[in-house]
């Protein structure tokens, strides 16, 4: 499970001098849905997480600054099914 770092996104918008609507467009999500996420009314699902990951990759940002993961990201490319059958 992952959660979004709202404060980091607010800092990103301030540093880039962009609005929530503009960032929502960059993340390819509905601006009203993004507004609810930023207010803490919604958690944000896979599409939001994917948008943040893509933004970080495009702009050279640290993903873990913008998304909190309950478990550390693995550098291992094996799937858990592969590990279980080994």
Image (tube, rainbow, N blue to C red):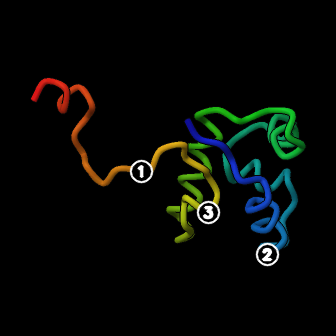
Q: Residue shown at 71%/53% (left/top)?
A: 5
**Pair 2/3: label in front:** 3
In this rendering, is residue 58 above or below 81?
below
Determine whether the residue tagged by mark 1 lies in a helix, strand or loop. loop
Determine whether the residue tagged by mark 2 lies in a helix, strand or loop. helix
For label 2, the residue is 15
In this rendering, is residue 14 above or below 80?
below
> Rounded to the nearest whole Å, what is the CA distance between mark 1 and mark 3?
13 Å
> Rounded to the nearest whole Å, what is the CA distance between mark 2 and mark 3?
15 Å
> Residue 3's spot in the image, x, y percent?
65, 43
In this rendering, is residue 57 above or below 34?
below
For label 1, the residue is 73
Q: Quadrant of the N terminus?
A: top right
Cβ atoms under marks 1 and 3 closer than 8 Å: no
Q: Residue shown at 69%/53% (left/top)?
A: 26
Q: Residue shown at 41%/50% (left/top)?
A: 73
Q: Earlier in the sequence, mark 2 or mark 3?
A: 2
Cβ atoms under marks 2 and 3 closer than 8 Å: no
Q: Residue shown at 54%/52% (left/top)?
A: 53
């Amino acid at each position: 499970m992952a959660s979004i770092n709202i404060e980091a996104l607010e800092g990103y918008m301030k540093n880039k001098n962009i609005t929530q609507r503009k960032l929502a467009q960059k993340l390819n999500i509905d601006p009203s849905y993004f507004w609810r996420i930023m207010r803490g009314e919604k958690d944000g699902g896979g599409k939001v997480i994917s948008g943040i990951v893509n933004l970080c990759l495009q702009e050279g940002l640290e993903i873990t600054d913008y998304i909190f993961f309950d478990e550390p990201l693995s550098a291992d490319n094996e799937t858990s099914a592969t590990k279980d059958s080994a």
